[in-house]
């Protein structure tokens, strides 16, 4: 049996609710013969009469009543589905998927999420932790709507990357160490180092910073979890280089933060598919771009 038409079911329910074919035709803006045809098609499909007809009112048969009860549920769900889609199209409802690194999610996105919750309460934001390369791949696959990535990134026809902000890279050292006012490549290269491994954009950025000064230090420890790195620095195991947005929100007396000489910046960008994006994702993108650095 082919699926029953929602339009036919809506006609049947309307007839019973209003009590006549004529009233249903007026309410549904259909010609009376069309209303009769809808009922005839349903009855032919089910092989049973669905309505009792008399001069004063139309009432459902037992089978008709069962069908109408189920039809109301289907029609309500269909109406809710259409309304949800309409609200999502307007950006009033929707789910937006964002991927980025743990430090960005922990330190930069809370204020963004608060603004989204205040200005767009119907939008749900789903976060996932990824490297920049993983975020770009997931944006390209359509698995996420927005990826916050380290720059630079290669240009593609499918993905657009918008510069967002840049944060200074700083040195974190144990407070017990004697140190200059600013950390230079030469000074840091002579210290035990705890750095990200070469899979991260920050590692490549700092490697280039050292190399520009003719230094090629080898890390004592490599780790990609910044909180663990900061704990090791606090314990006196070595110094590290992290972007300022990844440094502790509250000062840790065991850690001293030094600016770098020459200065080093970690730029971040926002990646999304180059094709038109849904309204909810555009609203979230607007909030991100309006967030001061």
Image (cartoon, rainbow, N blue to C red):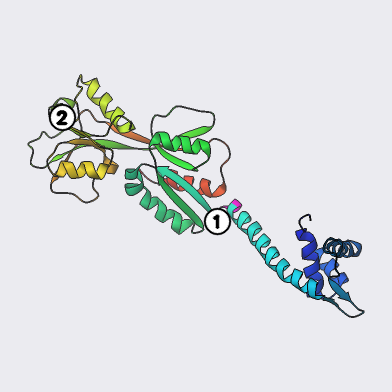
Q: Please tell me whether residue 171 is drawn above or below residue 281 in the rendered image.
A: above
Taking the image as shown, residue 223 lies to the left or right of residue 186, namely right
| SS type, badge 2 | helix
**Residue 23 position in % (x across, y down):** 85, 71
Q: Nearer the viewer, residue 72 or 110?
A: 72
Q: Nearer the viewer, residue 177 or 8?
A: 8
Give the magenta-colored segment's residue range. Answer: 89-93
**Residue 65 position in % (x across, y down):** 77, 74
Taking the image as shown, residue 104 lies to the left or right of residue 270, namely left
User: Of label 1 and label 2, which has the lower sequence position?
Assistant: 1
Residue drawn where x is 50% and y is 34% of the image: 160
Q: Nearer the viewer, residue 1 or 3?
A: 1
Image quadrant assignment for residue 2: bottom right
Image quadrant assignment for residue 257: top left
Residue drawn where x is 44% and y is 40% of the image: 147
| SS type, badge 1 | loop
Identify the image quadrant of the C terminus. Answer: top left
Outermost residue, top side: 214
Magenta stretch secondary structure, dominant: loop
Residue 137: give its label. none
**Residue 266 position in % (x across, y down):** 32, 34
Judging by the rendered image, the residue that carries numbered circle 1 is 93
Q: Please tell me whether residue 266 is drawn above or below residue 277 in the rendered image.
A: above
| Crowd rating for badge 2 (residues with CA inside 10 Å; few <14, some 14–19, many 20+) | many
Taking the image as shown, residue 259 lies to the left or right of residue 153, namely left
| Crowd rating for badge 1 (residues with CA inside 10 Å; few <14, some 14–19, many 20+) | many
Residue drawn where x is 19% and y is 21% of the image: 215
Judging by the rendered image, the residue that carries numbered circle 2 is 188
Magenta run includes residue 90: yes
Cα distance in 3D space between marks 1 and 2: 50 Å
Q: Please tell me whether residue 65 is drawn above or below residue 36 in the rendered image.
A: below
């Amino acid at each position: 049996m082919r699926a029953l038409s929602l339009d036919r079911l809506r006609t049947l329910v309307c007839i019973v609710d209003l009590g006549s074919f004529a009233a249903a035709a007026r309410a549904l803006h259909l010609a009376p013969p069309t209303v009769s045809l809808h009922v005839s098609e349903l009855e032919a499909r089910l092989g049973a009469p669905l309505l009792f007809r008399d001069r004063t009112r139309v009432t459902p048969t037992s089978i008709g009543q069962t069908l109408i009860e189920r039809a109301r549920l289907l029609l309500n769900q269909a109406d809710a589905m259409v309304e949800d889609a309409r609200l999502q199209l307007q950006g009033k409802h929707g789910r937006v998927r964002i991927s980025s690194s743990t430090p960005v999610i922990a330190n930069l996105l809370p204020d963004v999420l608060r603004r989204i919750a205040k200005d767009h309460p119907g939008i749900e934001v789903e976060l996932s932790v990824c490297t920049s390369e993983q975020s770009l791949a997931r944006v390209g696959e359509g698995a996420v709507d927005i990826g916050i990535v380290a720059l630079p990134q290669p240009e593609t026809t499918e993905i657009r990357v918008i510069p967002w902000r840049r944060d200074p890279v700083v040195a974190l050292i144990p407070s017990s160490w004697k140190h200059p006012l600013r950390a230079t490549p030469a000074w840091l290269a002579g210290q035990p180092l705890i750095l990200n491994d070469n899979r991260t954009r920050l590692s490549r950025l700092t490697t280039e910073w050292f190399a520009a000064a003719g230094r090629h230090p080898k890390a004592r420890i490599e780790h990609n979890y910044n909180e663990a790195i900061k704990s090791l620095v606090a314990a006196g195991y070595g110094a590290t280089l992290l972007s300022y947005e990844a440094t502790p929100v509250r000062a840790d007396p065991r850690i001293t933060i030094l600016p770098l000489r020459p200065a080093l910046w970690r730029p971040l960008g926002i990646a999304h598919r180059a094709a038109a994006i849904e309204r909810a994702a555009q609203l979230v993108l607007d909030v991100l771009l309006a967030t001061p650095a």
